[in-house]
Amino acid sequence: MTPKERMLIAMTGGKPDRVPATPDISEMIPSRMRGRPFWELRLSGSGFGGEEYGYYTRANAEAYLEAVKYFGIDGWDIGYVKLGPSKDDKRTFRREIVSRDEDKVVARDYVRTSEGILWQELLYPSDNPPWMVRGFIKDFERDFPIYLKYFFPDPSSCDDKNFQEWRNKFGDLGIVGLCVGYPGFQDLIHYVDGGLEKITYYYYDYPDLFEEYRLRYHEWAIKMTERILRAKPDYLMTGGSGTITLSSPEIFRKLGLSTLKETTRIAKNAGFPSLLHSCGKEKDLTKMCAEETDLSCINPLEVPPMGDCILPEIKQQFGDKIALMGNLNTTSVWRATSREVEQQTKKAIEDGGKGGGFILSTGDQCGRDTPDENIFKLVETVEKYGRYS
């Protein structure tokens, strides 16, 4: 059975030949393996905007594929290569390098619209992923309406040529997805200057603007889902890191749940599985997804204290409704001996593997300095003991 077949069967609740071994090594480990400054991958594209306007670049995708082959894991492409830009997009983009030294690069990205310019500033360390220093939305009353009007162009015309080429290159080494999210604090954290504190105040101070945001995002997400499925990815990727951790179950239910219901319904009716990633607290989210949406699989089910998911409890309560992907503690995988990794892997298989519908992964991304031998031991253990009970 190929890794792609194994992943697709498991994420739709079935029993493949064995449990897939799919630690989350989405960026830090592949970047470290390159032996070059991390910013080279993130700043390697044609510039800010278009297909490079997003979290990852094609260079990140290539680095991940190299890591999949090196470790022999069942690949999980999380949407590295995106659809092309929309012909309806009225924005123009420009990137400026503000400063550069051996430790970091600071870049400023400008988005020009007919109603004003928004800009963000990101810091790219040499040995870690980037983080936002300044966000696009600085004056909420002035900038948020511009964001709502221009940052959700109709995706119907987006080209999928680069995605198809990438999917063919990835082949049967795993599943390749395309992403659509849902409205919420986990989305706005990437745009609002001042971060979570400001978002929280704005949420209560500007309810009408937040309702407009919810409706605008929802309409865009439906169109994007329909366009994604025409490109025929292996699955629909959705979610947002910290969906519950950055807000609350009540706020997610008000802002994002209706969108998630609709996008997963569309995917299911079209015959495509869907997978949601949301690091942090996820127990309440798992319950909502299992009981109120058509989601196929949820990840990463982090353990306390970073999360709140106890795998055997989650399996018992929801395992017959939704496939599970997780949930080795990433700090333990980083600091443990290979013998301890083996023990933890065997326990996760025992806790999550009963009846099928389980993918062995980590509770979020493996840290940069995770020893290679620990990942090899994880894969070796799954290959030896990863049979569903």
Image: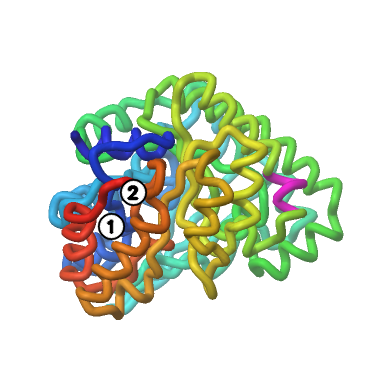
Image location (x, y in percent) of residue 24: 34, 57
Q: Who is closer to the viewer here, 79 or 377? A: 377
Foreground residue among 269 and 204: 269
Residue 9 seen by the camera: yes
Identity of the amino acid at label 1? Leu
> Looking at the image, which residue is at 52% across and 64% down?
310
255 inside magenta stretch: yes
**Which residue is at the front of the view, 250 or 139?**
250
Whole-number angstrom distance, CA of label 2 to CA of label 1: 7 Å
Q: Give left or right: position of 23 versus 141.
A: left
Label 2 environment density (alpha carbons within 10 Å; few <14, some 14–19, many ≥20): many
Q: Give the camera-side residue of 76 and 6.
A: 6
Q: Amino acid at mark 2?
A: Thr
* Vertical comparison of 81 with 271: above or below: below
Instruction: Judge the density around disc 1: few (<14), some (14-19), many (≥20) Cα neighbours within 10 Å.
Output: many
Is the residue 87 above or below the residue 123 in the image? Answer: above
2 or 1: tag closer to the N-terminus = 1
Residue at disc 2, secondary structure: loop
- Residue indicated by mark 1: 41
Vertical position of residue 300 compared to residue 98: above or below: above
Q: Quadrant of residue 200?
A: bottom right
Q: Does the magenta portion include 319?
A: no
Q: How many marks?
A: 2
From this view, report whether residue 338 is shown above or below residue 55. Answer: below
Magenta residues, start to end: 251-256
Q: Residue 269 is drawn in which quadrant?
A: top right
Q: What percent of the width, then of the height, locates residue 375?
A: 22, 64
Give the quarter of the figure containing the N terminus: top left
Residue, disc 2: 57
User: What secondary structure prevails in the magenta region?
Assistant: helix
